[in-house]
Image (tube, rainbow, N blue to C red):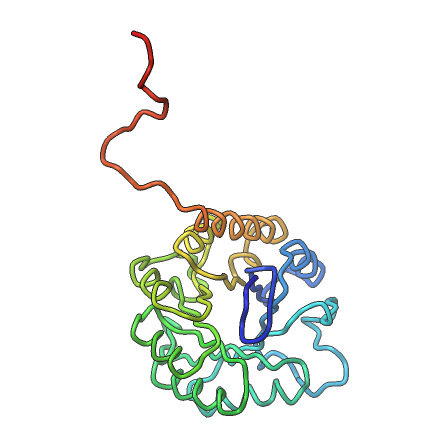
Amino acid sequence: MLKIGEKEFNSRLLLGTGKYPNFDIQKEAIEVSETEILTFSVRRMDVFEPDQPNFLEKLDLAQYDLLPNTAGAKTAEEAVRTAKLAKASGLCDMVKVEVIGCDKTLLPDPVETLRATEQLLEEGFIVLPYTSDDVVLARRLEELGAHAIMPGASPIGSGQGIVNPLNLSLIIEQANVPVIVDAGIGSPKDAVTAMELGADGILLNTAVSGAKDPVKMAEAMKLAIEAGRLGFQAGRIPQKRYATASSPVEGISV
């Protein structure tokens, strides 16, 4: 089980809801992924409309936990205000803190992310901050009380996969809360690698919604995350410089 705060989930795949070719494909991809957590930008919806916002209109939201994010925020104050709007809608009590510090790379602002996380924790939110692969920053966020840490594998939407596996593995090794890899995953191979490093889960959007066949990619990512998790738990054999016979040689007649 993936446990975030007091919430427990069977799936370790968190899936975004944006940029699908159409709502029918979005719905089918979400269903085949078997995700239990959907993430979305609060700024893309009017949280006080009586009807569901159109980009979620085909989904039975009662089946999912919603994880709104504060995308678009440049300061802690903006992030906190956005999170409060989402909570006031009654849709959720979890929030993904996203405070962007660079418009070109879309990398998070570490100072404002720390400030926003601290303020939202004081407000009683279940807080999942999006951060860079900075080992010390990840530890500081956990020390504040963040319920999970969400380091990026590479820049948002880049599909580059894990550019710094060493830092990611160090974050995972030191963390006492779930580490959910967020941003940059491009293929099932990347998802397997992240999970084999010991990640507790993966958040995806563009890798699925931007694929030639989003539905097939959603299923592929689900299976990749499951395979990577099993591989991590099983424990891989050590890598060696030279070959080792796979069949026993003792007791073999010559």
Q: Is residue 116 above or below residue 200?
A: below
What percent of the width, then of the height, locates residue 69? 53, 77
**Residue at the limit of the structure toward the front, as seen here:** 251
Task: Name the residue furthest top.
Answer: 254
Residue occupying the point 44% across, 74% down: 130
Q: Residue at 32%, 8% (x, y): give it.
A: 253
User: Residue visible at 49% across and 91% down?
Assistant: 122
The residue lying furthest to the left in this view is 241
Q: Based on the displayed image, in which of its 4 quarters is residue 52 positioned?
A: bottom right
Foreground pick, 57 / 124: 124
Query: In the rendered view, would you say 31 is above or below 95?
Result: above
Figure disc tally: 0
Judging depth in this view, the residue of 200 and 248 nearest the camera is: 248
Picture coordinates of residue 188, whole percent (x, y): 49, 49
At 58% from the left edge and 73% from the top edge, which residue is drawn?
Answer: 40
Query: Against 63, is 229 above or below?
Result: above
Quarter in which the C terminus is drawn: top left
Image-based side of 51 in relation to 181, left or right: right
Question: The N terminus is located in which quarter?
Answer: bottom right
**Picture coordinates of residue 75 (x, y %)?**
42, 88
Residue 38 in percent (x, y) is at: 61, 68
Q: Nearer the viewer, residue 177 or 109?
A: 177
Tell me where residue 184 sits by quadrant. Answer: bottom left
